[in-house]
């Protein structure tokens, strides 16, 4: 129960993802129409939005780690600003006013979003167990996580080593 609460609070913190969640939960199928929670394309759009946000955050995470590797000195001026799904991140090695995350907190945020993505994928296939598209999407994501954790996607830079331990 705690994990579900954590995943939902992560999703709620992203306005664009919250819109998907609300459209799935609040839609009432009218006469002759299907509720969005039983619409494969609504789930696919939601999962693709989550994937886009995760890709953006992972890319920023790798860039931050590469910056840290080249510059050993922590400085507030070395701040990365990122906009993802309606949420703004200001990441710096030193927590200061206006900074939303340190690199360690940003890593934790990505891991929480990965867990939320897993939960949404499992919800989709539990509601529509006969959908090949949803199963393929969910299983492709899960196998990608396995590849990442085993180091197959490691390019040698070591940028996502802390994300590999999911």
Image (spheres, rainbow, N blue to C red):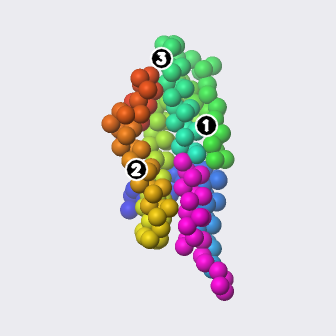
**Residue sitting at x 57%, y 17%:** 75
Element class at badge 2: helix
Circle nearer the N terminus (2, 1): 1
Nearest to viewer (mark 1 / mark 3)? 3
Stretch of the chain drawn in magenta:
30-51
Give yes or no for residue 48 being in the magenta stretch.
Answer: yes
Q: Counting other residues with Cα less than 10 Å from the Cα at mark 2, is it few (<14), some (14-19), or many (20 or more)?
A: some
Circle nearer the N terminus (1, 3): 3
- Which residue position holds label 3? 69
Element class at badge 3: helix
Above or below: residue 107 compared with residue 155: below
Give x and y (percent) for residue 140.
44, 51
Give x and y (percent) for residue 3.
40, 56
Nearest to viewer (mark 2 / mark 1)? 2
Q: Quadrant of the N terminus?
A: bottom left
Give x and y (percent) for residue 137.
48, 55
- Which residue position holds label 1? 89
Spatial distance from mark 3 to mark 2, Cα to Cα?
29 Å
**Residue sitting at x 47%, y 68%:** 131
Number of marks: 3
Q: Quadrant of the C terminus?
A: top left
Looking at the image, which is closer to me, 150 or 20? Answer: 150
Looking at the image, which is closer to me, 55 or 89? Answer: 55
**Residue sitting at x 52%, y 13%:** 71
Spatial distance from mark 1 to mark 3, Cα to Cα?
21 Å
Spatial distance from mark 2 to mark 1, Cα to Cα?
26 Å
View extreme (left): residue: 150
**Residue sitting at x 55%, y 40%:** 55
Q: Which quadrant would residue 11 be assigned to in this image?
A: bottom right
Disc number placed over residue 142 in the picture, else none: 2
Q: Answer whether labels 1 and 3 touch (C-beta < 8 Å).
A: no
């Amino acid at each position: 129960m705690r994990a579900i609460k954590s995943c939902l609070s992560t999703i709620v913190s992203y306005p664009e993802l919250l819109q998907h969640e609300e459209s799935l939960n609040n839609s009432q199928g009218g006469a002759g129409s299907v509720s969005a929670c039983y619409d494969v394309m609504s789930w696919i759009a939601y999962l693709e939005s989550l994937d886009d946000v995760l890709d953006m955050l992972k890319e920023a995470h790798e860039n931050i780690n590469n910056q840290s590797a080249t510059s050993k000195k922590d400085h507030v001026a070395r701040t990365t600003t990122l906009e993802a799904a309606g949420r703004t991140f200001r990441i710096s090695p030193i927590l200061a006013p206006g900074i939303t995350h340190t690199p360690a907190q940003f890593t934790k945020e990505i891991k929480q979003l990965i867990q939320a993505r897993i939960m949404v994928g499992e919800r989709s296939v539990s509601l529509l167990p006969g959908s090949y598209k949803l199963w393929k999407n969910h299983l492709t994501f899960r196998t990608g996580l396995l590849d990442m954790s085993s180091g197959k996607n490691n390019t040698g830079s070591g940028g996502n080593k802390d994300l590999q331990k999911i």
